[in-house]
Image (cartoon, rainbow, N blue to C red):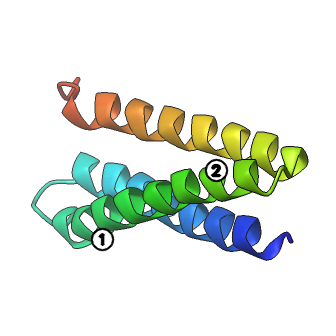
Amino acid sequence: MLWPLFGNINQVLAALVLVILTLYLKRKDGYRWLATAIPAALMCVISLWAAISNQFNFWQAQNLMLFFVNIIILILAVWVILEAQIAFFAKKQK
C-alpha cells in the first residue's frame, strides 16, 4: 500500500535536490545551471503530476492516511518549488 507513496516521495525529493542545485549553480557565474534546471523542471512536473494522480487513487480506495500524507507532501513540494522560483528570479545582491 505504501509503495506508490514511497516512489512518489523519492521522485519529489530528487526533483527538489535538482532545484536546489540549480539555485546554487545560478549564483555562480555562467550558464552551468542549465544542466540541472532542465531535468529539475521535468522532474517537478512529472512527480507533481504523479502525486496528484496518486491523490485521486488514494481517495477512491478510501485510504485516508495515505491521502492526507500525500496532501502534506504536495503542499511542501509546491512550497519549496515556489520559494525556489522566487529565489531564482530575485536580483543578485552584491
Residue with the mark numbered 1: 39
Residue drawn at x 25%, y 61% as measured from the top left: 37
What's the residue at 17%, 25% (across, down)?
91
Q: Nearer the viewer, residue 60 or 25?
A: 60
Q: Position of residue 58 (x, y in %)?
A: 74, 54
Task: Look at discs 1 and 2 and give the one toward the viewer.
Answer: 2
With 77 as the anchor, is 44 left or right in this view?
Answer: left
Q: Which residue is mark 2?
A: 55
Q: Left or right of 69: which side holds 27? A: left
Q: Position of residue 6 (x, y in %)?
A: 75, 69
Marks 1/2: CA distance?
24 Å
Identity of the residue furthest to the front in this view: 60
Amino acid beneath label 1: Pro
Where residue 69 sits, quadrant-wise, is top right
Question: Residue 18's x, y, as percent?
Answer: 42, 63
Quadrant where the N terminus lies?
bottom right
